[in-house]
Each structure stands twice: as C-alpha cells, then as structure tokens.
Image (spheres, rainbow, N blue to C red):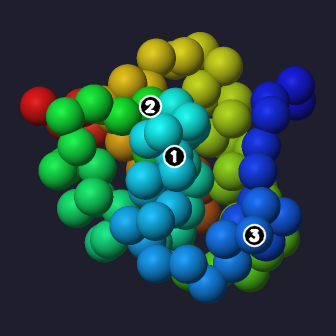
Amino acid sequence: MGHAAHHVDHIGLKGSPDWLLWKRALQENLILVTNNARDFRKLSARSEIHSGVVLILPMVSPRVQRQLFKAGLDYLAEHKNLINRIIEIDLRNDGVEIREIELP
C-alpha cells in the first residue's frame, strides 16, 4: 500500500523489551503497530510527543490480524495525522471497530 514498514524480526529487535522498541520508534519518528495495548498505552502516555500508535486489540490469528491491520490502513488513509494519537482496532459484533484516542 506504499508505506515503509519494519518488523522487529527484520531489524534485529526480536525479543527486545517494550521500552527499547518505543525508544526506537521515537528516535525514528515511526508509528508503532502492536497488539500489546497495555504496555504501549502506558509508554505513549509518558511521552511528550510521538508519531502515533496503532493497537490491534484482540488476540487473534495472524490472518485476522492482517485483516484488522488492513482496516486500520484504510482508516489512516483518511486520517493521516497520528501525532500523539492511538488508533485502536477491535472486533465488535462481527465487524471492525476503530477508535481514535488523542493523548494530552
């Protein structure tokens, strides 16, 4: 879809602690995509400014995760500014629900 993306496995950060992944995202102005909502909500709330976080909330199969991520990408095509925002992608009533949260 024309976006540059890095997977932790491919950049030598597999198994790294969350704070290190967050530090890398901050340093490189990257939007972080994860299903680890609990930890990355906390890390993003502690940061003065960040490029954004996309949370895929349900723990589902990789196939369903890809479908949810695609729905998130479609949403982001219309809402491009994620600075200090969290996008939560969830399953609700056999459909996809997307919520946008702006942090102070």
Residue 13 is at least partly visible in this image:
yes
**For residue 31, which quarter of the picture?**
top right
Asked which secondary structure carries label 3, the reply is loop
**56 sits left or right of 47 in the view:** right
Q: Which residue is mark 1?
A: 25
Picture layout, residue 76 above or below residue 80: below
The numbered mark at residue 12 is 3
Q: Who comes first in sequence, dot 2 or dot 1?
A: 1
| Number of residues whose C-alpha sits closer than 10 Å to that of mark 2, classed few (under 14), some (14–19) or many (20 or more) | some
Question: Identity of the amino acid at label 3?
Answer: Gly
Image marks 2 and 1: residues in contact by CB distance under 8 Å = yes
Q: CA distance from mark 1 to mark 3?
A: 14 Å
**42 sits left or right of 88 in the view:** left
Q: Who comes first in sequence, dot 2 or dot 3?
A: 3
| Number of residues whose C-alpha sits closer than 10 Å to that of mark 1, classed few (under 14), some (14–19) or many (20 or more) | some
Pick whichever, 15 or 71, lies toward us.
15
At x 77% / y 43%, what residue is drawn? Answer: 5
Q: CA distance from mark 2 to mark 1?
A: 8 Å
Q: Which residue is mark 2?
A: 51
